Amino acid sequence: MNKNDINLGQTFTIPEYRGRGIHTSMEKVIISYYSNEPRFLWGYVDVRNKASQRVLDKVGFEFVAYARMSMLTGIVRILENQKND
């Protein structure tokens, strides 16, 4: 990520509101707000979180790489560039 890029952080939807498109709608609003700016939007999800992966797919994100983030520093390190489904 570059200095002016935007990282869409983790979200949480309480169980009784899941499956209603709330997260997808929120991501669409954020993307439309920043769509005219010369920067990248980044999203990251846990590899086990299939629901969040589907949301990013629905709103047009493209898989770039697997990475590991240090919980201590917040620094993200790329691990590999290919998706292995």
Image (cartoon, rainbow, N blue to C red):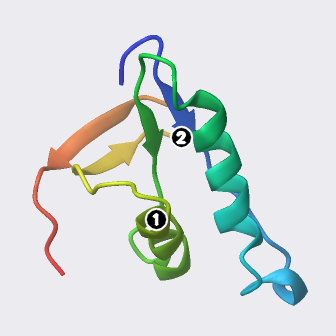
Question: Mark on residue 65?
Answer: none
Rendered residue at 66%/33% (across/down): 33
Residue 42 is situated, as x and y percent measured from the top left of the image, at: 44, 39
Locate residue 32: give its quadrant.
top right
Residue 31 is situated, as x and y percent measured from the top left of the image, at: 58, 42
Q: Amino acid at mark 2?
A: Met
Q: Would you name the residue on which mark 1 appears? A: 46
Q: Amino acid at mark 1?
A: Asp
Nearer to me, 11 or 62: 62
Number of residues whose C-alpha sits closer than 10 Å to that of mark 2, classed few (under 14), some (14–19) or many (20 or more)? few
Give the vertical position of 29 relative to 12 (above or below).
Answer: above
Describe the element under mark 2 as helix, strand or loop.
Answer: loop
Give the vertical position of 45 relative to 50 (above or below).
Answer: above
Rendered residue at 29%/55% (across/down): 62
Please identify the quadrant where the C terminus is shown. bottom left
Q: Earlier in the sequence, mark 2 or mark 1?
A: 1
Residue 74 is situated, as x and y percent measured from the top left of the image, at: 51, 31
Position of 62 compared to 59: left or right?
left
Nearer to me, 25 or 14: 25
Q: Would you name the residue on which mark 2 appears? A: 71
